Image: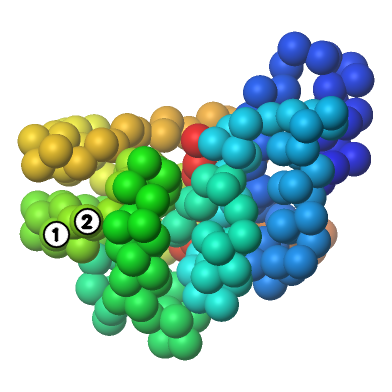
Amino acid sequence: MLAQFFLLRFLKPQAVRNVVFMGMGEPMDNIEEVLRAVRVLTQPGGPCLRAQKVTVSTSGVLPGMQRFLEESQASLALSLNATTEAQRSLLMPQNRLWPMGELLALLRHHGKRQPKREHFIGYVLLEGVNDSEEDARRLVHLLEGIPARVNLIPFNVHEASPFKAPGAERLKSFWQQLQQAGLRSLVRWPKGQEVAAACGQLALKAEGANSTRRGRNSTASQEAKT
């Protein structure tokens, strides 16, 4: 990550204003090196990025999240993608190890200690799965007391998944419900779909075979951050 950052800054000094740790495996599984990298990116005399301009994405590894929130002021982005424990366990099996309720309780606890520290919540919208009006209402309730902004991500369709993205009207309705409830949210529109390079579509295909090997934690791989 640091090598990529410094190379890009060398090639285009004004281009790098934000850094996001995502799409390369679960950052919290390598928390020591992630914290070290964040310190380098934000240290005076170095790249000197503001901590709020560095975001670390996670699918929800509780021990790593605890350390990150205690030892860094960088932004945290949690892939939520569901509004009930059963729903999230189906989409993201690791929820059985670190339940959604415990992850949100941790963010709520730190929200009381640092109310100005905003977290990002990623929510991949799947047609007929987690895009109902009830889901929108539950999401608002789940995030009460958490200084958060929700990134809504329409699912990027690919041949290895049975899921579909909701239609434009359903997506707009879901977003409006969050906005009307006072929950800050925005839609992260996909880029690169025409060449299967959008978030969650990257995969390795065996030549002459129909099988596809995919990235981390199924639905969580479509997480997007600021």
Q: Position of residue 84 (x, y in %)?
A: 23, 73
Pointer 2: residues within 10 angstroms few (<14), some, or many (20+)?
some
| Front residue of 162 and 111 | 111
Which residue is painted at 70% across and 66% down in the image?
A: 31
- Discs 2/1, front: 2
For image coordinates 90% across by 40% down, the residue present is: 3
Which quadrant, please, contains the N terminus? top right
Amino acid residing under circle 2:
Gly
141 vs 99, left or right, is left
Eyeballing the image, is 194 above or below 217? above
Q: Is residue 139 visible?
A: no
Task: Classify mark 1: residues with Cα within 10 Å, few (<14), some (14-19) or many (20+).
Answer: few
State the residue at coordinates (53%, 60%).
Answer: 69
Q: Residue at x 72, y 57 (%)?
A: 35
**Left or right of 109 on screen, residue 161:** right
Residue 206 placement: quadrant: bottom right
Which residue bears the numbered disc 1? 141
Q: Secondary structure at mark 1?
A: helix
Image location (x, y in percent) of residue 75: 53, 46
Whole-angstrom CA distance, mark 2 to mark 1, is 9 Å
Q: Residue 182: image x %, image y %?
A: 14, 38
> To which quarter of the image does residue 213 belong?
bottom right
Q: Is residue 141 above or below residue 22?
A: below
* Percent x, y of residue 211: 67, 68
In the picture, measured across the screen, residue 125 lies left or right of residue 40, that is left
Q: Nearer the viewer, residue 114 or 201?
A: 114
Which disc, if any, is residue 170? Answer: none
View extreme (bottom): residue:
97
Where residue 57 sits, quadrant-wise, is bottom right
Q: Helix or strand or loop: what does disc 2 sit on?
A: loop
